[in-house]
Amino acid sequence: QRVQGESNVLVIRVKSKDADNTLSKSDLYNHILGDGSDISTMRTQNPGTLAQTYDDCSFGKMKFVPARGNGIEDGVGFVELDEYTQGVNFRTVENWVTQAVNEKYGSVDDYDHIIYCLPEGTSEGWLAYGYMDWYRSVYNDDFCAQHSALIHEVGHNIGLSHSNEQGLYKDQTCLLGFSYRWTGGPRMCFNAHKNHFLGWYEDRTLNLDPEEFSWSGSITAFVDYDKTDVNEYVIVTFGNIFMQYNRAKGINEQVMEKMDELVIVEQGEDASENLAGIREGEKFEFDGTTVEFCYEYSKGDKDLIKVSVYRAGEGSGCSNRDFDTDGQPDNSAYEDTAFGCFSGEMIVVVEGKGEIPMRDLELGDKVLTLSNPPTFSSLYSFGHKSDSEQAHYLQILPSKLELTHDHMVFITGTQHAVPASSLRVGDHLASGEVITAINQVTRRGVYAPFTTSGDLLVNGVLVSSYVAYQGSDHLAVGPMQFSYHWLSHTFTFPRRLWCDHISECTTESYTDDGLSLWVHFPHQVMRWWLDFSDKSAFVTFLGNLCILSILSILACLEFLLHRKCTLLAWAVFAYRIYLSSRRDYQKKISNVSRGKLA
């Protein structure tokens, strides 16, 4: 039977002298050949049908259409037997149905697939069956509306064997495993072996040499097949082993086990065997071969995983390319990413709004910066804001904080924030959590909120509003070191003063790349200066000293502004100096005048 292209389907509803199938003609069409929109079920948001599921899982390469002609309506026919069927062997009833179909609708060989829906009450002990590599499948009464049974038995028609896992039918990652008494669901597809057999993803399959290989690379979730590019793979095979990323979303959103795991399947003589499902950081070893799930990440709207396969005595590929030798993310590949930002999925707490995603923040919002006691700080600007720009992020577990490599986060044991690129597994964040893993992900949308306090809580983690430069947390001026967090916060003082006391700053303009106009030029100058200053230590010292002097003046002004009594004292002191200087000046002028007169 065809596994690609269009195949017609004839569904036969059967009635006998003493029994009838309990499903109506419209029921059969809706569950088998319809689009699922007429199926009523509380268990599935997007109910599936036989036709819809094969269409979805093949990404349009395999289509079941209703048979036409000979009085057939919407692919559903009807035969009435002259025999009694209560308690009669189902194989006998099947033969009677075939005779009746030949007489009424022509030869059964004229159809690509025929589905018999027998009356209730035939002999006990059966639910449904399908013939391997042949057109016919047979169902006991209302099992003609059981979604997984339909997919399973027609799967046999097109040559698919069973999917086992330590027992017959036990593989619940595949619809050729266990069948469920569930109309319209579960919404899922097939395991890697079945997908390989069907050939739907042949152009995105990597076949490794089972005798001599060591491979590390990415596997894209098969549900994202339609988004893949050339040289991206959704199935990897070696010998009789088949692997795919079992992402639980979209057409596979209700897969019943091993969700979001790398599932490894072996093909035996009569069925596939689900060997294992492994998660990030886990390994599976068999026959001298190790399969390691390095990490998961996203590229646009595709989900991928990094995988390493190697023989005994060989090293893991998880430390190559995207990871350095100590197992931490190698951020050098991410240096050209967005100006220090967070992804839009990150959660912040806003006064009067509660928890909201970063992408929904607005200028003027008051954002939580301390949790005990609750302290809020005004959002006066976005250093970077773009809903469409794609960027690479480091994902810090367990909080799932996602930020660019140069954005700064507070950790315990230091007096200032450090760039995310310097974080390591085992570090203690200022929020109290211990880092358990660091992943790399790609998201669409970049956001860098500036608060008047210079910090905020993102996913419960205390972070800076600012970025570091050249992978360092400080700027060196001779023997002295000054935190980039302090330098950046001091630099923003004029803007914060303007927004706090003069204008509400509820609007601002951005470059085409999403950088705030008032941030863009200083940021470019700073990057240019750091690149230029590498050429001369003396020039670096003088330039940094000038920068520090300007920022020190701003820091003093801010210090005085926030301490009104001190400011008044300084004003009085300055006024007294002014008066004293004025008297001295007038006295000198008077003496000069007398001298001239003499």
Image (cartoon, rainbow, N blue to C red):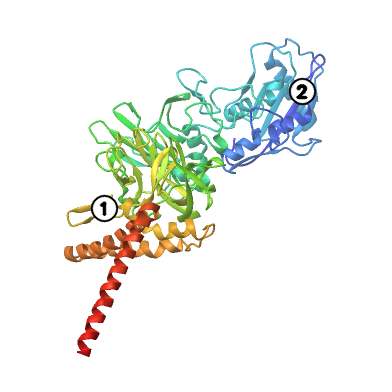
Q: Is residue 544 left or right of residue 432?
A: left
Circle 1 sits in a helix, a strand or a loop, which is it?
strand
68 is higher (above) or lower (below) than 270: below
- Location of residue 57 by image quarter: top right
User: What is the quadrant of the N terminus in the image?
Assistant: top right
| Residue 14: mark in rendering | 2
Residue 283 can be seen in this image: yes
Q: Are marks 2 and 1 in contact (CB under 8 Å)?
A: no
Q: Residue at x 31, y 39 (%)?
A: 318
Q: Nearer the viewer, residue 102 or 457?
A: 457
Q: Position of residue 13 (x, y in %)?
A: 76, 26
Q: Residues within 10 Å of mark 2 (few under 14, many from 20)?
A: many
Disc 2 secondary structure class? strand
**Position of residue 510 in the picture relative to residue 98 (left or right):** left
- Residue 252 in percent (x, y) is at 55, 34
The quarter holding residue 578 reads bottom left
Judged by depth in the image, the label closer to the viewer, 2 or 1, is 1
Q: Which quarter of the rendering shows the C terminus?
A: bottom left
Which is nearer the eye, 235 or 251? 251
Say what amino acid the circle numbered 1 marks: Phe
Residue at image location 25% in from the left, 73% down from the top: 584
Residue type for callout 2: Val
Image height of 361 relative to 374, above or below: below
Q: Can you tell which mark lies on residue 174?
A: none
Image x and y of residue 585, in percent: 27, 76
Q: State the mark number for residue 482.
A: 1
**Location of residue 132 in the rendering, given as x and y in whole percent from the top left corner:** 57, 27
